[in-house]
Image (tube, rainbow, N blue to C red):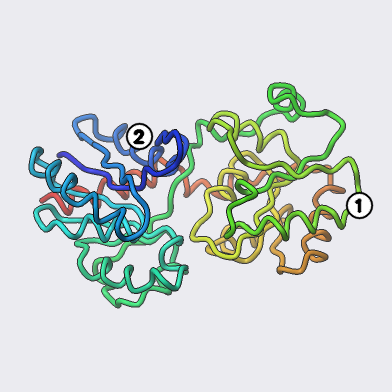
Amino acid sequence: MRILIVCSGNAPNFDVRKHQAFIHDQVEAVKQLDHGLQIDYFFIKGKGWRGYLACLTALKQLIASQSYQVVHAHVAMSGLLANLQRQVPVVTTFHGSDINVPMLRFVSLFVDFFSRKTVYISQALANKAIYAGKAKRAIIPCGVDFDLFVPRLKIQSRQALGLSLQKRYVLFSSAFDVAVKNYQLARAAVDLLEDDTVELLELKNYTRAEVALLFSAVDVALLTSFSEGSPQFVKEALACNCPVVSTDVGNVRAVISTLSSCYLTTYDPHDVAGKLRQVLTDKRRVATREHIVHFDNRLIARRILDVYTLMGR
């Protein structure tokens, strides 16, 4: 069986392992289950409606040149492009950056209707979908590489990353300039701590291996987003036994609500600061990894492979 992955490739100096890590990790996990499976990528170069639609001819040419059984598109705009060819059946995965955006909800409606199969990374996201094609839906979150994201010793992790052994670090969930991640709230909350030993770290320009080290090096992972689907940041932190403070977005409540070392917060910076203070004053590292074993990439890959197999018949 041969599969074509369709996703954005617009980031500067694009590297799928870095800029589409959750897709790359899923692809590699699926390939490990079936070594006879061939999986190719089509990276969309261009932004907005015109940019995406300008790639249609190249996509059709690639599909015509190979014997693909399934096209797997990630996010609604990629799904829109993939469904404009009708030669190969399409499965579209919705990640939240599509259905959560009002302007893209009707694009998602079109994609949901025309895709042979639709995957939502959380039930909460599926509940927001307009089209009621429930028979062809699957709820499959993105998995976590449990071989990479493992608990490590804090001192050694900090030394490897060149971080101070005296500071207390709060790891922000993204680059500071990504609007939906709401850096302003994180900055305000950390400033309210009025503690020079606490530093807010930007998650930017790190390799995947370094990100895995960061979760062991820092004291708490902070997510202040306005919207999410099923954030990898939270799951990867928990896989490393890193405490999480997060706004109540996507499926975060379902993931962390039973964990004593993790806290949901409102958008009030004083509330966020209070939850951060609780984590920073508690020296325990509660074992959170065991609570998210169902997100192991190998288990998720089996479910994705089952979708491919069913569609390719």
Which residue is more in the foreground, 177 or 206?
177
| Number of other residues with Cα within 10 Å of mark 2, as a class: few under 14, some 14 to 19, many 20 or more | some
- Whichever of callouts 2 and 1 sits on the residue coming sooner in the sequence is 2
Q: Determine whether the residue tagged by mark 2 lies in a helix, strand or loop.
A: helix
Residue drawn at 16 percent across, 39 percent down: 2
Q: Determine whether the residue tagged by mark 1 lies in a helix, strand or loop.
A: loop
Residue drawn at 24 percent across, 52 percent down: 54
Q: Position of residue 164 (x, y in %)?
A: 81, 29
Instruction: Read off the residue under disc 1.
Output: 194
Q: Position of residue 227 (x, y in %)?
A: 55, 64
Question: Where's the N terminus, which quadrant?
Answer: top left
Instruction: Read off the residue under disc 2.
Output: 28
Give above or below for 205 relative to 291.
above
Q: Answer left or right for 61 relative to 265.
A: left
What's the amino acid at mark 1? Answer: Glu
Which residue is more in the foreground, 264 or 202?
202
What's the amino acid at mark 2? Answer: Glu
